[in-house]
Image (cartoon, helix red, strand yellow):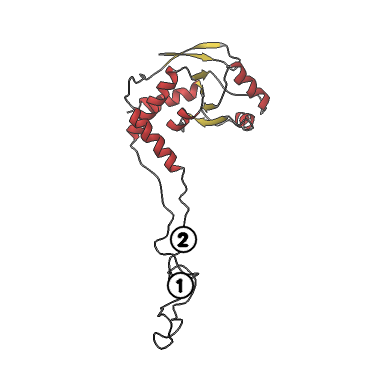
Amino acid sequence: MNLTIKNIKGADAGEHTVAFEVLEDEKGNQAVHDAVVAYMAAQRSGTACTKTVGEVSGSNKKPWRQKGTGRARVGEKRNPIWRGGGVAHGPKPRDFTKTITKKTRRLALLKALGERIKAGDVIVVDDLKLGAAKTKEFVAVLKALKVEGTVQLVIDQLDENLLLSCRNIPHVDVTTGTDLNTYEVLKNDKLVFSKAAFEAVEKRITQN
């Protein structure tokens, strides 16, 4: 499969032969599901936290004697049934991370990217460097490439001019070829790669 390489003015600048085979039928669908679920789970902070009896402030002194007062017996004021006491079996910070194997992660990226290529949602640009940090220049690039809707921009290395130029555009996300994940491939309407970034993703997919 070949992809047409564009320049930032939208003109053809050659072709690139995709280094991997696009998966057919339903192969890889489960891997994509597992990768997306793992990514979404990793975004959860798990910060809910309550104090146990051993963590709330207060002494271990018995509030009143065991017998003879006519009141219910109690051992300490930090007990769970008292106001200001500890919480019994309350939530504690937890890790929602789900682990998947490298092979599954690679298969998911291969399947997701292959489907986007087949759908015509992938654009490869020979070079995405801008001369200055101007949003107007980057908007002109998107217009020249005929890109509409949400955009996932994938570059080889983080470039300050490019980052500053697109940070005020709400529908553009930026990442690098080494950090691109399956969720980002599926999230946006279009994927715009620099040639070097696309080759970096190909290397990740085809490595053993």
Location of the C terminus by quadrant is top left
Measured from the top left, where is residue 29 in percent x and y? 35, 28
- Numbered badge on residue 50: 2
Task: Name the residue type under label 1.
Answer: Arg
Marks 1 and 2 in Cβ contact (< 8 Å)? no
Report if residue 181 is visible in the image. Answer: no
Measured from the top left, where is residue 194 in percent x and y? 52, 22
On screen, residue 22 above or below 180: above
On screen, residue 54 above or below 115: below
Location of the N terminus by quadrant is top left
Task: Name the residue type under label 2.
Answer: Thr
Please give the count of numbered marks on the rendered protein.
2
Q: Which residue ends up furthest to the bottom in the rendered image?
A: 68
On screen, residue 71 above or below 150: below
Residue 34 falls left or right of residue 15 = left
Q: Nearer the viewer, residue 37 or 114?
A: 37
Q: Nearer the viewer, residue 104 or 203?
A: 104
Task: Please name the residue shown 64% across and 23% down the image.
Answer: 139
Quarter occupied by residue 174: top right
Quarter occupied by residue 60: bottom left
Residue 207 falls left or right of residue 134 = left
Measured from the top left, where is residue 36 in percent x and y? 41, 35
**SS category of the residue bearing label 2:** loop
**Along the polypeptide, which appears first: circle 1 or circle 2?**
2
Task: Please name the residue shown 46% across and 64% down the image.
Answer: 51
Question: Would you name the residue on which mark 1 appears?
Answer: 78
Measured from the top left, where is residue 90 in percent x and y? 42, 60
Label 1 crowd bin: few (<14), some (14–19), many (20+), radius 10 Å: many
Residues under labels 1 and 2: Cα distance?
A: 13 Å
Residue 142 falls left or right of residue 102 = right
